[in-house]
Amino acid sequence: MHSATDSSIARMATPLGEQSRTRNTGGSTTRGTISFHEPRRRIAHLFLAAFLSTGPRTRTVWVCPDDYSEIGDECRKMADYTFTTRAYTFHDDIQTAPYTFHTVQTGPAPIINVFYTENVCPSGYNLEDYGAQGKICRLYGSPPTAQVKDPAPAGWTDNGTTYERTVQVQDETLDGFTDDGTQWIKRDDPPSGWTDDGTRYVRVTAMVAHTVIIYPVPDGRPWRDLHSFLGQWGSRHHLGDRSCPHRRRRAHNPSFSVPGSTQCLLHCSH
């Protein structure tokens, strides 16, 4: 069984001057030869023959997915490191310090020895002049003293045995974190499917197949036949200015065009 398309393609192999057409005239069928004086039919025929001779084909190409870069035979995506931070935490720490003391004198120094003198006292003695009563040399002993506890320093209290204060102390750095001086910080592990190349996170994937359509290139004998006919027919009908002969108006159909000066030829209608 042949389809209408098969029949059309088969007729393309027949020279146009020898093609025939069928016309139904009230029960009887007549066959006639297509005349070369039917330029639009001739152009359509040549265009179809050229198009079928170089119909679109497909090709499989391998490309990287969106957001990936092709590096060698791999597709790679890069991402900057991400980090997790934690604010410092603190705990109370009770600090103690021993008492400090100072010495105070508790009474007068005792007199160990005393004698009158005319003017001079031995070393260690004090010369005391009492005027008319005379001069006396006196030897004093050490005055009595006592150790007195100092008051608690500012910010400290006395708990009865030592000085004491409570201070906030920063906790030890969390496991896996470092201290940057203002907070604890650590670099996150690569997300699932990613690796760490030492500078960034990297994800590698394979190229994916895409099918692309390769459209016909206007080349080969069918296209040359079409161009030759258009050149000959167009020169006879003064189509250099792309105007339509015989007062035919042009139909705007931008989706239907072929190489060469065919806009008017294909789009002119009565």
Image (tube, rainbow, N blue to C red):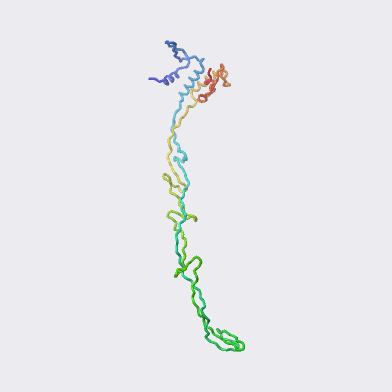
x and y percentages locating residue 197 in the rendered image:
45, 47
x and y percentages locating residue 237 in the rendered image:
56, 17
Instruction: Give the residue displayed 47% in from the left and 70% down from the top.
Output: 99
Nearer to me, 45 or 162: 162
Q: Residue furthest right?
A: 132
Direction from residue 130 to residue 90 in the image, left or right: left
x and y percentages locating residue 168 in the rendered image:
47, 60
Instruction: Give the residue displayed 56% in from the left and 88% down from the top.
Output: 115
Q: Residue furthest left?
A: 1
Instruction: Give the residue displayed 55% in from the left and 87% down from the top.
Output: 114
Disc count in the image?
0
Reply above or below: 15 against 141.
above
Reply above or below: 65 against 128.
above
x and y percentages locating residue 182 in the rendered image:
49, 55
Reply above or below: 192 against 183.
above
Nearer to me, 267 or 215: 267
Nearer to me, 97 or 226: 97
Reply above or below: 176 against 9.
below
Q: Which quadrant, please, contains the N terminus?
A: top left
Occupied quadrant, residue 118: bottom right
Direction from residue 193 to residue 245 in the image, left or right: right
